[in-house]
Structures are given as structure tokens and as C-alpha cells.
Image (cartoon, rainbow, N blue to C red):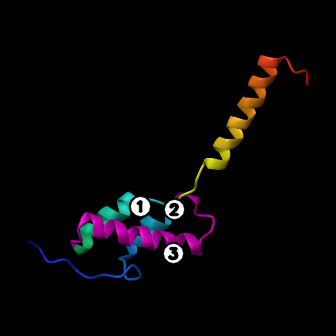
Amino acid sequence: MKPEIIIADNELPPEVVKAITQGRKIEAIKLLREATGLGLANAKVLVDRAALRYAQLNPNARAMTQESNTGRLVGVMLVLAVVFAIYRFGIAV
């Protein structure tokens, strides 16, 4: 069994940081594992932490943040409910 290297999320190799800032987290995980010999779970945790940090530094990096589409879903459901009510009850607009 190969010993794992201890690395902090602020000590990532430059190619990993570049992949993270470009929103390519899977590639960043692969690069980190190749460079350090880390396991999949540990590499993913480090990349996720670094992605959050770089997303805070670059607020325009939408691909790195996990956004919820709940608001959009509620809006679509509301529109569908209004359209159904108009169709079903014959409400004139």
C-alpha cells in the first residue's frame, strides 16, 4: 500500500488550481491524484474546498458553485398552476 502525502488545499499544484478556476473539478481531482498519490475521497475533499475558496475570490465563476434551481422550479410551477386555472375554470384575463 502506497503511503499518502499530506497536502493542504492551499498547497495544490498549479495545474490543479488552473483546472479548478476553469470549473473542471473532475479533471482537477485526476490531476491531484496523479501528482500526489492521494485517494479519490481525499482528493475530492481538497478540490471541493479549494473550489469554494476560489469561487469566493472570483464571484463570476458560476460553474464552481452549487446553485439551487428551487426558485426557478417554483416559478415554473406557479405559471403552470395559473395556466391550468385559466383553462379549467375559464377565468378571463
Magenta stretch mostly in which secondary structure?
Answer: helix
Q: How many marks?
A: 3
- Judged from the image, the secondary structure of the residue bearing numbered disc 2 is helix
The residue located at (81%, 22%) in the rendering is: 86
Please identify the quadrant where the C terminus is shown: top right
Which of marks 1 and 2 precedes in the sequence? 1
| Residue placed most toward the observer, 44 or 12 | 44
For residue 48: magenta?
yes
Label 1 near label 2: C-beta < 8 Å? yes
From the image, tell me which residue sits under label 3.
53
**In the figure, is residue 92 to the left or right of 36?**
right
Amino acid carrying label 2: it is Met
- State the mark number for residue 64: 2
Q: Is residue 38 left or right of residue 69?
A: left
Which residue occupies the foreground of this view, 84 or 33?
Answer: 84
Front-lying residue, 55 or 17: 55
Which three-letter amino acid code belongs to the residue tagged 3?
Arg
Amino acid found under the numbered disc labelled 1: Lys
Residue 57 tag number? none
Q: From the viewer's perspective, is residue 14 above or below residue 39?
A: below
Residue denoted by label 1: 25
Task: Please determine whether, in this image, residue 5 is positioned above or below residue 45.
Answer: below
Give me the residue at 37% from left, 64% from top.
28
Residue 13 in the image: state x and y as whole percent.
35, 76
> Which quadrant does the N terminus fall into?
bottom left
Q: Quadrant of residue 55?
A: bottom right
Disc 3 and disc 2 in contact, CB within 8 angstroms: no
User: Is residue 55 within the magenta segment?
Assistant: yes
